[in-house]
Image (spheres, grey):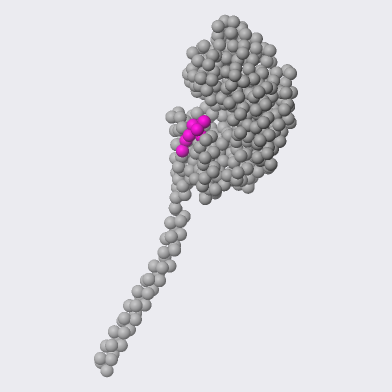
Amino acid sequence: MKRYNNVLCLILVLMFTISMLTGCGGSKEEAAPEVKKGDEQTAQVELKFLHKWPQPQNMPYFEEVIKEFEATHPNIKINMEAVADEPIKDKLRVLMGTDSQPDIFFSWSGEFAKKFVRSDNALDITEAFNSDTEWKSSIMQAGVEPFTFDGKVYGMPFRINGKFFIYNKDIFGKYSLQKPQNWEDFIQICEKLKSNNIIPIVLGNQYPWASCHYLTSLNQKMVSQDVRMRDYNPKTGEFTDPGYVKALEYLKSLSDNGYFNTGVNSTSHDMAREMFCAEKAGMYYIELEEFAELEEIFPGKWDFFAMPAIPEGKGNQKFLTGAPDGFMISAKTKHPDEAIEFLKFLVTKENGEKLVKQLGWPSPVIGAVNVNNAPPFLVDGMKAIEEAEGMALWLDTDIHIKVSDVYLAGLQELLSGSKSPEKIMEEVRQMAKTVQDEVE
């Protein structure tokens, strides 16, 4: 009986021990999902971010913004890559045909951005933008509109830009020259400078976007808005209006009459700036975003004006050439919410003011450019943009890429004297017809 009791006790002890072990095991199994869940909440999402400003003077701004964003969003890691202005066009063309797209990528506005929409590579952010009234009300409509297609928003402006002639105040003063009110005044200035052995206008057309910006303005001034918009649409573009040939003739006349420096096609834009700052030329056509850099190396010695009106032109003469550029989100991103969150952060008023103060770039965030944080020339430039009756977007990003390529090559040949305006437009029309057949 005693042995039986001992055995019974032993069995009971073993059963109790097993139940305790099983209970502990069960607790561990239940705890595991909680740990896993916590890990998921703190897991780091990685976003690829591609922009076009790798220059040493520009990168600290982006590094600082990313650092601040990551500090307030510890679950998001931003992997930044920067590729310069020309190479990024080729890089984007390659990446958009793959599954290795950056989550957030730079884009010019207009047709350049629209091709990402047509190819289903751009995320529709309309709902996120409209539902956040604070975000929506903080951005200039003039900046958002060129990223809006068929009523849907696909990108956010990061900068807003305009194109102006700058001029040497001392040279203008020496020869009693005033800002031109029309094209005739402009030509008289060029003649006066040329007669005194001063290059009237310095142009660096090694990359033909520089002359393309001239043509952007001239096309807009010579061709009515409705015709131009129909032609810039790849589905309907014909380019038969005689104003396009006249626009090229105006540009050619500047070259033929000796108003540009020699060797424009072998001169870079930076070399042109150096020539202007060395006071070898009276005028130079640049973007508002370049004003701050110019002021650093040529302080207080310059002023600016928009391309003057051409009375015979059929376009609105109070338009200004320029455009916003900004960022879009890949439709293939695995993290759309986080990408939108970063995009919002890029265009806050605080970061817009920092953009103005650190880099001198005009921000499309309302109130970011003001007398308290921006030099007078930037405030005046933004005022000129606001007072313009419309914007002519950069031609090379506002038309189909194949048509743009024909134009760009033709412009260098135009300025070298090897191709006529009529021949260039004949080739443009042929390519526009080819594009129509492709997109229909």
Residue 144 sits in quarter: top right
Q: Position of residue 238 (x, y in %)?
A: 71, 31
Residue 385 sits in quarter: top right
Residue 143 sits in quarter: top right
Relative side of 162 to 292, left or right: right
Is residue 94 visible in the rendered image? The answer is yes
In the rendered image, the vertical position of residue 132 relative to residue 219, given as above or below = below
Residue at image x 56%, y 11%?
199
In the rendered image, the vertical position of residue 303 relative to residue 174, given as above or below = below
Using the image as rendered, state which of residue 377 and residue 80 is in the foreground. Answer: 80
In the rendered image, residue 420 lying in the magenta stretch gets the answer no
In the rendered image, the vertical position of residue 79 relative to residue 216, given as above or below = below
| Quarter of the image that includes the C terminus | top right
Residue at image x 53%, y 38%?
92
Q: Position of residue 249 (x, y in %)?
A: 66, 18
Q: Position of residue 418 (x, y in %)?
A: 59, 19
Most extreme residue toward the left, as rendered? 3
Using the image as rendered, state which of residue 368 and residue 407 is in the foreground. Answer: 407
| Quarter of the image that includes the N terminus | bottom left
Say how many tags the image has. 0
Residue at image x 53%, y 25%?
207
Most extreme residue toward the bottom, as rendered? 1
Is residue 138 visible in the rendered image? The answer is no
- Part of the protein shown in magenta: 81-88
Residue at image x 73%, y 30%?
227
Q: Position of residue 176 (x, y in %)?
A: 61, 7
